[in-house]
Image (cartoon, rainbow, N blue to C red):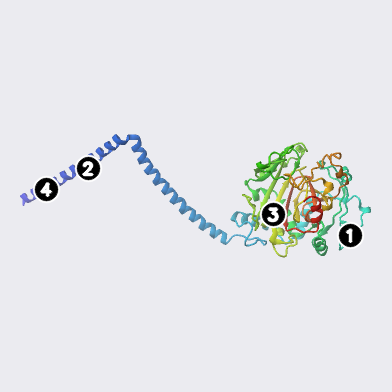
Amino acid sequence: MNGALHKRSNATNATKHNRNNYQKSRGQRQRRRLRRKVKKYGIGKYCRFEFMVLLVGFVIFLCLGMFVYGKLRAYEERIALASKYNHSDSLPDIGDKSLQYAQLREIYDAKLPENDTKRMKDFVQSLRKNEYFPIMKDEMTYDVFNCPPDPPPNYPFAWNVKEVLDNWPIDDTTRRNFIYQGICVFDFETEDDKIMTYMDVEVPFVIRNDPKVLRTSERWNQPEYMEKLLGAVKHRTEFSHTNHFMYFVKPPKSAGKLKGWKEPTQRSRTSFHEWFEHAKDESKLSPDKDHWYYRLIGCGRWACTERDSSEYLFDELAFFQPREDNLYLVHPKKQQGIHCRFGMKGVISENHFDGTRNMIAVMGGERRYLLAHPDQCEDLALYPKSHPSSRHSAVDWSNPDWKKYPQFKRAEVNEIVLQAGDVLYLPTYWFHHIISLNMNFQCNTRSGASQEYKDAIRDCGF
């Protein structure tokens, strides 16, 4: 038996010895292969190969982790969206559907209940710091604050442009209590029949005290609301070294250089905060200082190309939504988005006409509008149709050159100061010259064109 144990012990020792020799030779073979690779490729290349293998593995692992994380976040967001707040004016197919916007509206809708019309009226009225009255009241056949059911003859009254500008120069933002106002102001709740009548015959007027407009105006004038709504997104902004702004279409290079013409403004992109920092200190603003004109565009069902489209405008300005029963849209299917322009004190938008009807709402601040009938086209001395600023008056209304443009002496205009909560209806082809009397928020929407004034514009070369 001892002999058997001895043989088994020797066999075990031999097995261990063979295993050790195998492992030793295996290690030697690996080292030899490594030395051959190093000799063939060099230590740097071999290490880079090993490093790249590790790096690729890490990237794959990271991507898988991010994919799983994204799926989890998307699931959580779907759960949150399923139970998110929907405001009363939300439309299913347009507007801002983000959770962030829903949370912001939930906070402010709770703070400012929509069923308290009196509160909204009182708040917006507190924003209207000034009163304006017709300077030529005794010469007019109607009261602009109590207009007849049908537009009176020669409505709206207009006066010689020189007389109007002498009374209130374009660059002067100091308020005048008496102005050359010729258009009617209607109360939304009590004069709806008049509103429809005047709109049907395509004449300008102002609507006041619409609860939906008041609601937006109140919300937009809450401290910090606009900062929260707009965030740090940069939007289209026009810049000028003076207070004058004129729209233009940049001519193609093939058209050659237009003698004596240069781009009237520069285009950039800024955030609301950046624009507000420029606009808030009005004591430093003057006609010869730098000005910025900030702009938002909500596309809705309109095929626009704005890369940072502000779709929440269709939630914020519910009165401009493309509904069939909407007073502010004559043809909802022809709506061309919602456009908002934020003006600094003194900003001037030069006199021009648009080829569509327009509804213009002021949410805060004041804007002075000088209006002219389309039959004044020739006397307003427009740039020709081929000009980059076609449709605009060539006259500098801040300092008219009466010798160069003698016909301008014959032009007739009227004016209106739009305040918070006011909505101006401007028919197709009506001329308008705009002055920001202080920092203000204005939004407008267009919905088709009428043909009542087409002949006057065609006779003028357009």
Within-10-Å neighbours for mark 1: few <14, some 14–19, many 20+? few
Instruction: Name the kind of residue labelled 4 in the image.
Output: Ala
Marks 1 and 4 sit apart, C-alpha to C-alpha, by: 126 Å
Viewer-proximal residue, 74 or 412?
412
Task: Quickly name the residue at label 1.
Answer: 152
Determine the secondary structure under disc 2. Answer: helix
Residue 190 visible at all: no
Residue 120 visible at all: yes
Determine the secondary structure under disc 1. Answer: loop
Marks 4 and 3 sit apart, C-alpha to C-alpha, by: 94 Å
Residue located at (66% from left, 53% from top):
298
- Lower sequence index among marks 1 and 2: 2
Marks 3 and 2 sit apart, C-alpha to C-alpha, by: 77 Å
Look at the numbered discs 1 and 2 and tell me whether their residues touch, using CB distance below 8 Å.
Answer: no
Instruction: Name the kind of residue labelled 3 in the image.
Output: Ile
Residue 146 placement, left or right of 386: right
Residue located at (29% from left, 34% from top):
39
Could you tell me residue 213's position as x and y percent? 74, 57
The tag on residue 338 is 3
Look at the numbered discs 3 and 2 and tell me whether their residues touch, using CB distance below 8 Å.
Answer: no
- Lower sequence index among marks 4 and 3: 4
Marks 1 and 2 sit apart, C-alpha to C-alpha, by: 109 Å
Task: Quickly name the residue at label 2.
Answer: 26
User: Foreground mark, 4 or 2?
Assistant: 2
Task: Quickly name the residue at label 4.
Answer: 11
- Lower sequence index among marks 1 and 3: 1
Residue 169 placement, left or right of 439: right
Marks 4 and 2 sit apart, C-alpha to C-alpha, by: 22 Å
Look at the numbered discs 4 and 2 and tell me whether their residues touch, using CB distance below 8 Å.
Answer: no
User: Foreground mark, 4 or 3?
Assistant: 3
